[in-house]
Amino acid sequence: MAGWEAAPAKVNLYLHVTGRRADGYHLLDSLVAFAGAGDRLRLEPAGALSLALEGSEGATLAAEPDNLVLRAARLLAEAAGIPASGRLRLEKNLPVASGIGGGSADAAAALRLLDRAWGLGTAPEALAALAARLGADVPVCLECRATRMQGVGEILSAAPAMPECGILLANPRLPLPTPAVFRARRGDFTPPAVLPSGWADAAAMARSLAACRNDLEEAAISLCPPVAEVLAALAALPGCLLARMSGSGATCFALFPDAGSAESAAAILPEAWWRWGGGFTNPPLPAYSALAGGA
Ligand code: C5P
């Protein structure tokens, strides 16, 4: 049986709201990268499909039928015309409703893990289409490596070549519902970013990203003022190259020249916050890449 499947935290290094669709969904341009922090998912042999929640954040989530992991499992089984079976164990380490895609990462991990465990060999494009039905961020989480995301999350393209660098995540332990943040957003749309083909080092990447923004930051702060405190605390850390909110918050991130300095900076932040410092993860997952040239 398969081992643990990683469901790494996604970080929106920038997020531009470029427009709005007639159905109310927002058009985005975002560079998404994945941190070494994450949830983990495992399948054990059993009859009927079930989900057990573990980990430090497991108690904050109920294993209800609408849990994204169960929805992903049922959707994949239905598409393949097989009964969904097995006991899923989700080790929940990421705070819930926090802008780093916990639920989306878990759903994507479920699609990858179950497609393998059930021996389906679903085509990458078909798996990506199922992912899009589960949520706007699930296709990018299926890629599980730095990717540029556009449209409402379904248009994926290769990210610029990213240098080694460190990342620190901090969350004030206050959940922020994504729809409320999008509703509270004010102001014009922002054009898509102009990005180079790659960055030589972390400082160059941070300089380039500083010309971009997270268009949901102001709205998130209006609903959850402590986000501003987190951003200020991150910006003041020694060695911080850039501090910004991820997704619809409330998790914020700081970029550092290397994983070690991000890890030691985490200890300086208030203990009441959820904190994680380390590097990015870029696991090779060619079998599941819907990106052109992603073989
Ligand atoms: O797709 P997902 O369930 O993650 O999105 C949650 C909510 O966030 C949506 O119902 C919508 O209100 C908002 N959203 C949006 N535009 C996007 C993604 C999400 O307006 N591109």
Image: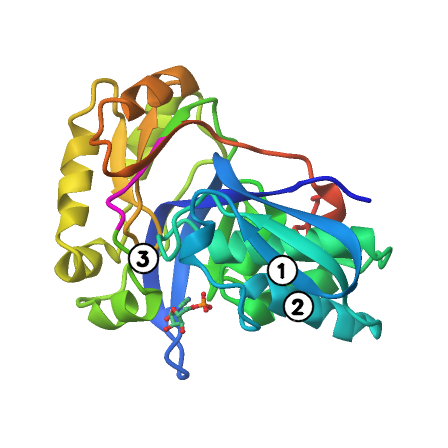
Q: Inspect the magenta stretch and tell me whether residue 71 lies in it.
A: no
Name which residue type carries label 3: Ser
Residue 211 visible within the image:
no
Q: Residues within 10 Å of mark 2 (few under 14, many from 20)?
A: some
Q: Which residue is mark 3?
A: 248
Name which residue type carries label 2: Leu
Q: Secondary structure at mark 3?
A: loop
Which residue lies at the image location 57% right of the left edge and 68% below the top edge? 134
Where is 242 relative to 143, above or below? above
The quadrant of the picture showing ligand 1 is: bottom left
Q: Is residue 88 left or right of residue 222?
A: right
Disc 3 residue lies near ligand 1 with CB under 8 A: yes
| Image quarter hosting the C terminus | top right
Q: Which mark is residue 130?
A: 2
Q: Is residue 263 left or right of residue 117?
A: left
Residue 263 visible within the image:
yes
Q: Are marks 2 and 1 in contact (CB under 8 Å)?
A: no
Query: Residue 268's x, y, as percent?
Result: 22, 22
Q: Which mark is residue 51?
A: 1
Mark with earlier residue (2, 3): 2
Where is 164 relative to 78, above or below? above
